[in-house]
Image: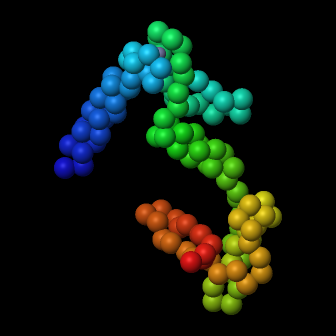
Amino acid sequence: MYRTDTTNKNKNINYNKKMKKCPECKANMIEKRSKTPDGISYEYFKCPKCKEEIVDMKQLHEVARKYRIMKKYHVKLTKWGLSYGLRIPQDIIKRDKLSKNKNLIIIPEEVGFRVIPEIY
Ligand SMILES: [Zn+2]
């Protein structure tokens, strides 16, 4: 079952690759690979006819995901009573506008967990 799903997904990607039309001249665009100045590889579409280059949403999200992974932090757990605490780096505190007594939500993932500010 899982294998079948994977095959179909790959087929869709190939299909999209072939069907990407240039918004300028309607020619079929070619998917290419390049690197950002930070060394993050990314994919984009280039028109062989008018040289137009575009990055679609899927490609953009993939670059954003790679940047997030690059900016990872290493922290150590400390024991607080029966629980454990982790220090949140100052960069994250500033970026997410966190402050003392801010409520956070822990969402268990398949591996590890996600911590997000409670905003609603
Ligand atoms: Zn074009």
Residue 75, image quadrant = bottom right
* 33 horizontally vs 74: left or right: left
Residue 85 place in picture, x, y as percent: 69, 78
* Residue 12 drawn above or below residue 31: below
Residue located at (24% from left, 45% from top): 5
Residue 45 place in picture, x, y as percent: 48, 24
* 88 horizontally vs 60: left or right: right
Residue 103, image quadrant = bottom right
* Residue 54 drawn above or below residue 118: above
Which is more toward the observer, 71 or 112?
71
Residue located at (74% from left, 61% from top): 95
How many callouts does the rendering have?
0
Q: Which residue reaches farthest top?
A: 49
Q: Which residue reaches farthest front?
A: 24
Residue located at (53% from left, 18% from top): 52
* Residue 28 drawn above or below residue 59: above
For the C terminus, which image quadrant?
bottom right
Which is more toward the observer, 82 or 119?
119
Which is more toward the observer, 24 or 44?
24
